[in-house]
Amino acid sequence: MMDVNEIRRYLPHRYPFLLLDRVVDLKEGESIVAYKNITINEDVFNGHFPNYAVFPGVMILESMAQACGVLGFKTMNKTPDDGSIYLYAGIDDARFKKPVVPGDQLFIEASILSEKRGIWKFACVAKVDGQLVASATILCADRKVS
């Protein structure tokens, strides 16, 4: 289990773009389960949409990518402080099944499919109350930062 303070050790993201609140399960080299609490106080709801608050699909994908980042960094035994950054390399087969709204707890599950020359491939799903809301295959690239 990782709280937000430990998550911040493995991700360079900060408010308002840190999109994980807690990691509840992590098996290095295999999988991660994390969640984000969706609240009406988030800036994104000022414009998406003012009269019908829906958490944007791109933010769900970013939450998935951040979970993948934590899993990747933990698996490699690295942090951003080591001069490494995890960047999006691709998103395949993204699907959205139902809206995510304020009050929801968005659970993200990701598992490693492969790693080749610093490109990692993850199978990801997002769920609310055990129901699938989104899925995608996410590719991330581990790169050095100078």
Image: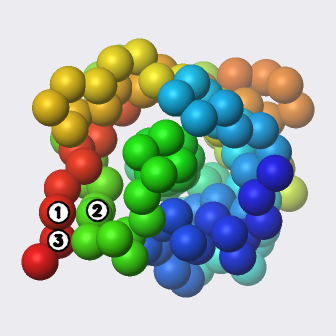
Task: Choose between 126 and 27: the one closer to the eye.
Answer: 27
- What residue do we see at 34% from left, 19% from top? 114
- Distance Cα–Cα, label 1 vs label 3: 4 Å
Task: State the SS at label 3.
Answer: loop
Residue 36 location, quadrant: bottom right
Q: Residue at label 1?
A: 144
Q: Are marks 2 and 1 in contact (CB under 8 Å)?
A: yes
- What residue do we see at 63% from left, 65% from top? 7
**Residue 63: image x %, image y %?**
54, 51
Q: Residue at label 3?
A: 145
Q: Residue at label 2?
A: 85
Residue 132 location, quadrant: top right
Residue 30 visible here: yes
Q: Are marks 3 and 2 in contact (CB under 8 Å)?
A: yes
Check the image and report above or below for 7 versus 111: below
Task: State the SS at label 1.
Answer: strand
Q: Are marks 1 and 3 in contact (CB under 8 Å)?
A: yes
Please state which amino acid type lies under the numbered disc 3.
Val
